[in-house]
Image: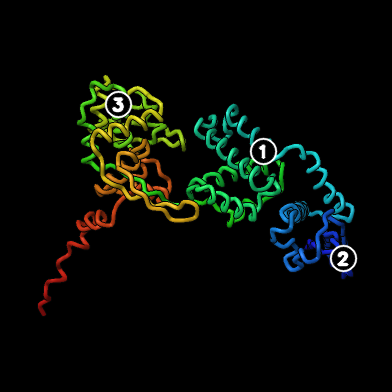
Amino acid sequence: MANIKFKYNRGIKIKDESKPHYIYLRYTLGRSVDFQTSIGVKVLWSDWNDDDEKVRNKTSIKDRFHINNLINNLTTHFNTFENENKSKGIIPTYKDVKDHYNSYFTKNEEVKDVTLFSFIDEFIENAKNVPNPVTKKLVKPNTIKDYNLTKNTLQNFNDEVYKIDFDKITLDWYYDFIEWCNTKGFKMNYTGKHIKTLKTFMNSAVDKELTLNYAFRSRKFSVYREETDSIYLNEDELKLFWHLDLTDEPRKEIARDLFLLGSYTGLRVSDFNNINEDNVKIENGVKMLKVRTEKTGKTVAIPVHPVVNAILQKNNGKPPKRIPEQHINELIKEVAKTLKLNERVELNYNKSGRMVTEFKLKYELVTNHTARRSFCTNAYLSNMNTDDIMALSGHTTYKNFKKYIKVSAEQTAIRMSEHSFFKNKDILLKKVK
C-alpha cells in the first residue's frame, strides 16, 4: 500500500529557524518506489505543524490557505492515482509516480486562466441557455437571480476581506465567511443560502476538473439553516378569503382564486399558477386535478375540493388565468389586509450570530407559499392520513413534510384528545373477582 507524507526540509534537522525551508512530498510503495520532491513552497519552522503535516492555522501566516490546499489537493491527486492503479491491477514505477506528480501541475497550468469568478460567470450563462441534463429544463429566473446574488456577495467578500479563488474555499474560509456575514447583519438562512449556492458552483467546477479542492464537501462545511416561523391560514380564515367580494377588483380576485387553489390542493405556486383545463380529469366518477409538478417532475392526482370546483365553474370549467408569481404575493397581502388579519405574530431568527425576536401582523406574512403550508396543516388537523397528505402534496420524505405542519402544542393536544388512548375509561372500572 502506498504511503504519502509531507515533511519539512525532507525531515532533516534545520540549523537556522529564522529562515523558511521547503515542504517535501514523499510517496513510497513498499520497497519498489521512494519518490521525494519539493512541492515548491517554503515556510518557517515555527509555522509548520509536523504532526498534522500542515501549516499552522495562524492569521499571521499569509499563504496558509494556499499551502494547505496544495497539500490537500496533492493528497487527493495521489489517492486517486492509487485507487485507479489498484482497480486496474497496475504496480506503478518510480517514473509513473514522477509523471503523475508532474501531471498535477501541468493540468493546473492549463486551467490557470479560469478563476472562481470567471467560472461562476460561465456557469450562470450556461444555466440561462442550456437545459439541465436531468430535468431537461432551463433554470428558473429566480434561481438565476440567486446565483447572481451569491456571486455578488462572494465578490464583496473578495474585495473587503481577502482574495479568493478555487483553492481558497477551505474550512478556514468558511468560518471567515460566516463571521463576515454576521458583521453584515445577515440572517442565518440568508448566509446558508449563499453557502449552498457556492457548493453548487464548486461541485460543477470539480466535475469539469477545474479544481481538486474538495474541502467544501466536508461535513463541517455545512449549510446554515434554521426553521422559520412561517404561518398558515386555518379553515375559517380561508373561508373569509372565499366570501370576500372582489368583483370590482378583478386582479385581486384572480390572485385570491389562485391562492385558494393552492390552499385546497397543496400545489406549489409554480404549479397552481399554470393549471389549465387539461389538468382537470374525471376517473371512476371522481373529479380531480392531475398535475406533473415542475420542481420534482412527479405527477400528483388531487380530488377537487368544493372551493376549487366553484372556482372552475366560475371560469367555465377552467382555472383562473396565470399572473406573475410576485404579483400574486403582493395582491394576496392586500386581500389579507382587507380581511383585517391583524394578529401579532412572533418571529424568532438568528441574525448576525444572535437570536432576534420581532413581531409582525399576520397579513404581512401571507405569501404564495402560505397556500401550500395551509393545505398541509389543515389536512393534518382534520386527521387525514399523513401518507395520503404527502401523496397529494408530493412530499417524498416525512422530514420535509413536517416542516410544513404549523401546529401549536395546544392544537396537537386537541387533535389527539379524540384518539382512543385518551378516551379509554376502562381503567376506571374496578374488576370484580
For the residues bearing labels 3 and 1, Cβ distance under 8 angstroms: no
Considering every residue shown, the one lying at the far top of the view is: 316
Dot 3 or dot 2: first in sequence order is: 2
Q: Which of the 4 image quarters holds residue 250?
A: top left
Q: Mark 1 or 2, which is nearer the eye?
A: 1
Q: Amino acid at mark 2?
A: Arg
Picture disc at residue 252 = 3
Q: Please name the residue shown 59% across and 26% down the image.
A: 129
The CA span between labels 3 and 1 is: 43 Å
Residue 75 in view, yes or no: no
Mark sitting earlier along the chain (3/1): 1
Q: Nearer the viewer, residue 383 or 431?
A: 383
Dot 3 amino acid type? Lys
Q: How busy is the neighbourhood of tag 2: few (under 14 within 10 Å), some, or many (20 plus)?
A: few
The spot of residue 263 in percent (x, y) is: 30, 37
Choose the circle earlier in sequence order: 1 or 2. Answer: 2
User: Residue 10: x, y in percent?
Assistant: 86, 64
For this view, does 431 lie left or right of residue 403?
left
Q: Is residue 73 above or below residue 285?
A: below
Extreme residue in the left direction: 432
Q: Give the total number of marks visible in the rendering.
A: 3
Q: Which mark identifies residue 31?
A: 2
